[in-house]
Amino acid sequence: MDKQMIDRINELARKKRTEGLNDAESREQKALYKRYLDEIRGQFSSTLDNVSIKEADGKVVPFKDAYAKKKN
């Protein structure tokens, strides 16, 4: 997400607090928030792809594999 999009999110947030948003602005804000959260979730998932866990037996496994074992 580029700086222009983040600036627009902030602009809409300020306007919502002060004046309120019309229907079009409200829809735009929801769409921008969704896009922003999707990008953050993607970045977090990519970070987890690079994290490893050392198990009690000394074996090192990717975090997602270790987490999947504990869920089952």
Image (tube, grey):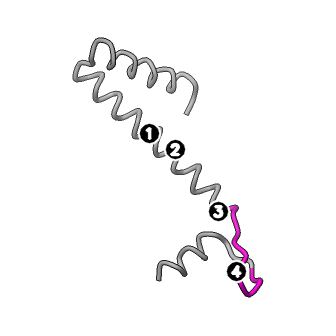
Classify residue 44 as left or right of residue 15.
right
Which residue appears farthest toward the front when viewing the image?
56
- Residue 64 occupies which quadrant of the picture? bottom right
* Rendered residue at 56%/73% (across/down): 67
Please tell me how crowded label 1 is: few (under 14), some (14-19), or many (20+) other residues with Cα within 10 Å: some
Q: Amino acid at mark 4?
A: Glu
Please tell me which residue lies in front, 56 or 61: 56
For the stretch drawn in magenta, what is the main secondary structure? loop
Label 4 close to label 1 by CB (< 8 Å): no
Distance between the Cα atoms at labels 3 and 4? Answer: 17 Å
Label 2 close to label 4 by CB (< 8 Å): no
Residue at which label 2 appears: 39
Q: Amino acid at mark 3?
A: Asp
Q: Does residue 69 sit above or below 5 in this rendering?
A: below
| Dot 1 or dot 3, earlier in sequence | 1
Residue at which label 3 appears: 49
Classify residue 51 as left or right of residue 13.
right
Which residue appears farthest toward the right when viewing the image?
58
